[in-house]
Amino acid sequence: MITEQIEALIGAAIIVALGVVVGIGKGDFLIAGYNTSSQERRKRVNIERLRLLVMVLSLAIGATLFISSFSSHSEVIVTSVVLVLTVVYLVLANTWAKRKE
C-alpha cells in the first residue's frame, strides 16, 4: 500500500515538474505534435496559450494523482479526471490556442 502511494507521489511530482518546464517556455519540444510541425504550421499556433494549457493540464493531473494516492478508489478517480481533462484540453488546444488568420 505505501509503495503504491510513493509511486503515485513520484509520478505526480514528475508530471508537475514537466508542466512547469513547459509553462516557463523551456519545454516546447515536449508538446506532442508541436515539435514535429513545420514552421508554417507553428505560425498558426499561439504558443503562449498552448504552453498555458499544457501547464494547467499537467498541474491538474499531478494534483489528481497526489490526491488519489490517499484514496482507495484511485483508479476510478484518476481515469475519470484525466479523461475529462484531456477532452477539455483537446477542445481548447484546437480552438483557443489557434491564431486567428
Image: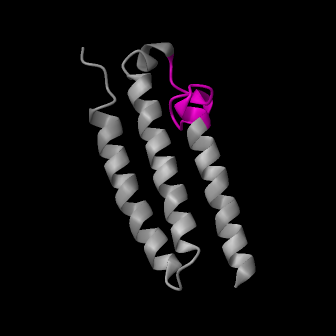
Residue under the image location 67 percent in, 51 percent down: 14
- Splitting the image into 4 quarters, where does residue 65 fall? bottom right
Residue under the image location 56 percent in, 42 percent down: 19
- Decide which of 47, 37 is in the foreground and name it: 47
Against 53, is 67 above or below? below
> Where is residue 48 drawn, in percent x and y?
43, 24
* Residue 29 shown in magenta: yes
Against 99, is 27 above or below? below
> Where is residue 94 drawn, in percent x and y?
31, 36
Against 71, is 66 above or below? above
Against 84, is 25 above or below? above
* Residue 49 shown in magenta: no
Residue under the image location 40 percent in, 65 percent down: 81
Q: Residue 51 vs residue 30: left or right? A: left
Region rendered in magenta: 21-38
Q: Residue 68 vs residue 12: left or right? A: left
Residue under the image location 51 percent in, 77 percent down: 75
> Where is residue 5 drawn, in percent x and y?
67, 75
- Splitting the image into 4 quarters, where does residue 56 fall? top left
Name the residue furthest right: 3
Q: Main secondary structure of the magenta part?
A: loop
